[in-house]
């Protein structure tokens, strides 16, 4: 469904992506792992067209992502942002229904609210949360609201950017389970960026290891522990010694 072929992207002298090749099958859950600053977020932004690659091609269903109707293209995506990225001045239900209250997906306010309440229920939040403001919620609840917003418009593709950052282990487990359940229920194609190996094992069908601007290894999550790749092996076991140099 999504294919990156020899994608390069530099910011001045900083070459972030140096020939990324990656294929994500329809209906599968791909998790991209790698250290901070390795280009994971840049790759995601290139797929969304928020950043234009310097060279290479990115296609969605065989079509170049830089061409065609941008609104129709973006309507196919949902996104759970790393920091939640909720609008402080809007009540929870308007955050969840943000895309349903404007643009090409616009619905009547009453209908949008009903959808928002249903999506909140799906992520384990009660209807009374709908009229609260983000500041009244815990970090875990805010993350659930972000997940509800990501699925509100029934997207075909969902991106998750560090979905468990800042959460305690129990809440991280809850979010991982929700992500897995929802992706399977919706039949969506999922791409996740994370360095949390617990999340990787919980939500991935396939894993790609991004380091130094290229994919060092990609394959089924079941083969990750026995890949034989020194970069992947060092990363998943958190070893200080290996081909990945630790910044001291």
Image: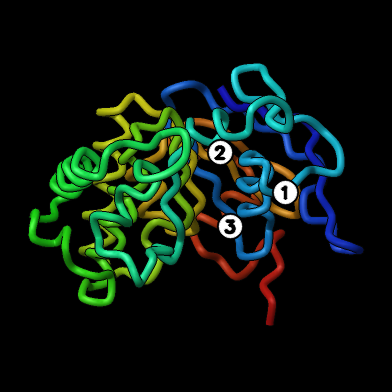
- What is the spatial separation of the Cα atoms under label 1 and label 3, in whole angstroms? 30 Å
Within 10 Å of disc 2 (Cα), the crowding (few <14, some 14-19, many 20+) is some
Q: What residue is drawn where x is 84% and y is 60%?
A: 11
- What is the spatial separation of the Cα atoms under label 3 and label 2, in whole angstroms? 11 Å
Point out which mark residue 181 bears: none
Specify whether residue 223 is in view: no
- What is the spatial separation of the Cα atoms under label 1 and label 2, in whole angstroms? 32 Å
Q: Nearer the viewer, residue 195 or 60?
A: 60
Q: Quadrant of the C terminus?
A: bottom right
Give the mark, 1 or 2, whose residue is nearer the N terminus: 1
x then y, percent, for residue 6:
80, 34
Specify whether residue 103 is in view: yes
Residue that label 2 marks: 227
> Dot 3 lies on which element?
helix
Query: Are the residues tagged 1 and 2 within 8 Å (C-beta)?
Result: no
Residue that label 3 marks: 234
> Dot 1 lies on which element?
loop
x then y, percent, for residue 185:
25, 28
248 lies above or below 125: below
Residue that label 1 marks: 51
Q: Nearer the viewer, residue 91 or 189?
A: 91
26 lies above or below 99: above
Classify residue 174 as left or right of residue 1.
Answer: left
Q: What residue is drawn where x is 47% and y is 40%?
A: 103
Within 10 Å of disc 3 (Cα), the crowding (few <14, some 14-19, many 20+) is some
Q: What residue is drawn where x is 13% and y is 47%?
A: 121
x then y, percent, for residue 242:
67, 62
Classify residue 221 as left or right of residue 215.
Answer: left
Give the mark, 3 or 2, whose residue is nearer the N terminus: 2
> Dot 2 lies on which element?
loop
Residue 164: image quadrant is: bottom left
Classify residue 210 as left or right of residue 57.
Answer: left
């Amino acid at each position: 469904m999504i294919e990156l072929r020899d994608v390069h992207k530099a910011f001045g002298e900083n070459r972030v992506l140096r020939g990324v090749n990656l294929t994500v099958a329809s209906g599968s859950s791909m998790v991209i792992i790698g250290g901070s600053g390795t280009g994971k977020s840049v790759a995601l932004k290139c797929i969304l067209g928020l950043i234009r690659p310097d060279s290479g091609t990115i296609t969605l269903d065989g079509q170049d992502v830089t061409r065609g109707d941008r609104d129709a293209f973006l309507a196919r995506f949902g996104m759970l942002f790393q920091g939640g990225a909720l609008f402080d001045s809007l009540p929870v239900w308007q955050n969840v229904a943000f895309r349903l209250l404007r643009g090409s997906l616009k619905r009547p306010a009453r209908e949008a609210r009903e959808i928002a309440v249903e999506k909140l229920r799906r992520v384990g939040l009660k209807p009374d949360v709908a009229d609260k403001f983000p500041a009244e919620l815990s970090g875990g609840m805010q993350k659930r609201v972000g997940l509800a917003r990501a699925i509100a418009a029934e997207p075909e593709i969902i991106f998750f950017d560090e979905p468990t950052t800042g959460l305690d282990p129990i809440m991280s487990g809850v979010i991982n389970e929700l992500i897995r359940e929802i992706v399977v229920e919706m039949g969506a194609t999922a791409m996740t960026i994370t360095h949390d190996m617990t999340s990787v094992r919980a939500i991935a069908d396939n894993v790609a290891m991004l380091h130094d601007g290229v994919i060092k290894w990609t394959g089924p999550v079941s083969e990750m522990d026995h890949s034989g790749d020194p970069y992947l092996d060092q990363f998943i076991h958190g070893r200080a010694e290996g081909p990945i140099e630790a910044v001291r």
